[in-house]
Amino acid sequence: PPPPSPMAPNTPAVPTIKLAQDGGIMPVLGFGTAPDPPVPAETTRAAVIAAIQAGYRHFDTACLYHTEQPLGEAIAEALEKGLIQSRDELFITSKLWCSGARRDLVIPALNSTLRKLNLEYIDLYLIHWPVSSKPGVYEYPIKKEDFVPMDYRHVWEAMEECKKLGLAKSIGVSNFSCKKLEHILGFAVIPPAVNQVEVNPSWQQKELIEFCKANGLIVTGYSPLGAIATFYGSNKLMESDVLKEIATRRNKSVPQVINEE
């Protein structure tokens, strides 16, 4: 493969970690594309281009976010401009929405994601939430009447097929508790490589993280700053007197302190 493209001057290389089950090499720092409230596609595309120039190589999207297509456009633009030499320099994560969490809908859902991204494969495909909803409905929060029973075994078998077909290099889950992970691990032929959950100083998930470590799963954390400005988050971490004091003592910003812990 060609050598990695040069990044902006003085940009430190992002550490990486090897995923289990013959997965790829995942940069530990990722760039999320879940705007709340939503933003125009052009804003997402421009943000991804700027992130690539800044040194990001791991990008996280999902069917629900409606950012797969602008992310794909940004990747194509980055290749055209020589910001990267190969798609293989990037690590792309996307997620199966609840309305596709049925055995017969998983592979079609991933193929739809690949078409939007204009890619032949993604590096990591996650079950977005451990629930199923009526097919064809893409909204969050999910209405009570749209929930349907989830067949975990059959959905996971379809996820395993995604990996066997080469459509996803690694497969995993998101927002899964210890109990639900234990259930999946009880029958999985290919265990999940990743569990993506909210992790920050006010929601530390210590028991879940220990469970994942003990069972060979990598935990990736979203909303490290507390999901500022979203309908479900708050500014309490950024406004924390304790964190501000620590940041001042270390001569760093609050976000730097949060992401060091």
Image (cartoon, rainbow, N blue to C red):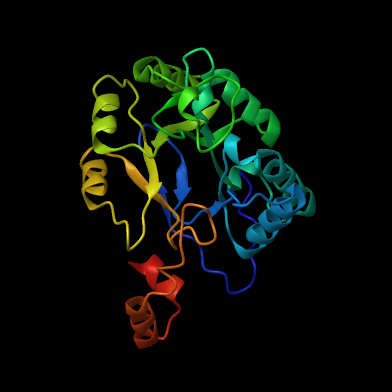
- Specify the quadrant of the image occupied by residue 223: bottom left
Residue 107 x/y as whole percent: 55, 19
Of residues 219 and 128, the one nearer the viewer is 128
- Residue at image point 41% right, 68% down: 236
- Residue at image point 47% right, 52% down: 232
- Residue at image point 58% right, 74% down: 10
Of residues 68 and 2, the one nearer the viewer is 68
Q: Which residue lies furthest to the front in this view?
A: 145
Query: In the picture shown, does residue 119 fall above or below 70?
Result: above
Residue 221 x/y as whole percent: 40, 52
Left or right of residue 52: residue 91 = left
Query: In the picture shown, does residue 158 fall above or below 83?
Result: above
Left or right of residue 162: residue 197 = left
Q: Quadrant of the C terminus?
A: bottom left
Can residue 118 be seen by looking at this rendering? no
- Residue at image point 51% right, 62% down: 228
Query: In the picture shown, does residue 238 fall above or below 136?
Result: below
Of residues 253 and 38, the one nearer the viewer is 38
Q: How many labels does the image show?
A: 0
Residue 179 x/y as whole percent: 24, 33
